[in-house]
Image: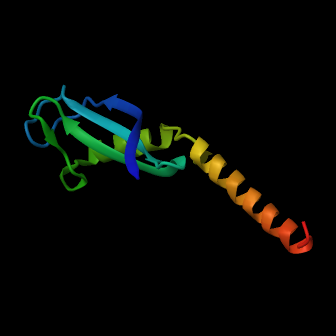
Amino acid sequence: MTESFIKLKEVVLKNNCPECYSNEGLRLSFKQKLIETKFYKSITSEVNHSLECKVCNTTIYPVQWTDDIERVFEYQQKAIQPKKASKYLKQASWISILLFALVIITITILAIYPNL
């Protein structure tokens, strides 16, 4: 099972970085979780966010956020449109469903008509 993230939106913030105090490097990104297995691919409703400063190359955690950053985050969080949660069955799933159905049909026919 592979878990990855689809980037929904990345916003450049004009707020000061709590680490280096630069007002040019903050990037807020929103990502939605994608799960992929051999049998299906699923987009979940889970949306993650991260705030990074490209000037000092650090991740800014919510504990370090200022009130201004929190206000901008809340606004941007309301503005994003996550993709609809969905599941997509791959070819391996369809083949196993068909094989299972054929086995059930065969067992049923042999149980009903044992003299064949």
Left or right: where does residue 12 sit relative to residue 32? left
Rendered-image quadrant of the C terminus: bottom right
- Measured as percent of width and height from the top left, residue 57 is found at 12, 35
Q: Residue at x 41, y 53 (%)?
A: 1
Q: Position of residue 30 (x, y in %)?
A: 38, 40
Q: Is residue 99 something that shows in the picture?
A: yes
Name the residue located 34 percent from the left edge and 37 percent from the top edge: 29
Residue under the point 48% across and 38% down: 80
* Residue at position x 18%, y 28% in the image: 25
The answer to whether residue 51 is above or below residue 113 is above
- Inspect this view and state whether residue 90 appears: no
Specify whether 38 is left or right of 30. Answer: right
Quarter of the image for residue 109 reads bottom right
- Identify the residue at the far top of this view: 24
- Please tell me in which quadrant of the rendered image residue 8 appears: top left
Between 57 and 69, the one nearer to me in the picture: 57
From the viewer's side, name the closer residue of 71 and 60: 60
In the displayed structure, 42 sits above or below 23; it is: below
State left or right for residue 13 relative to residue 17.
right
**Nearer the observer, 65 or 4:** 4
In the image, residue 64 above or below residue 18: below
Residue 88 place in picture, x, y as percent: 60, 44
Farthest front residue in view: 115
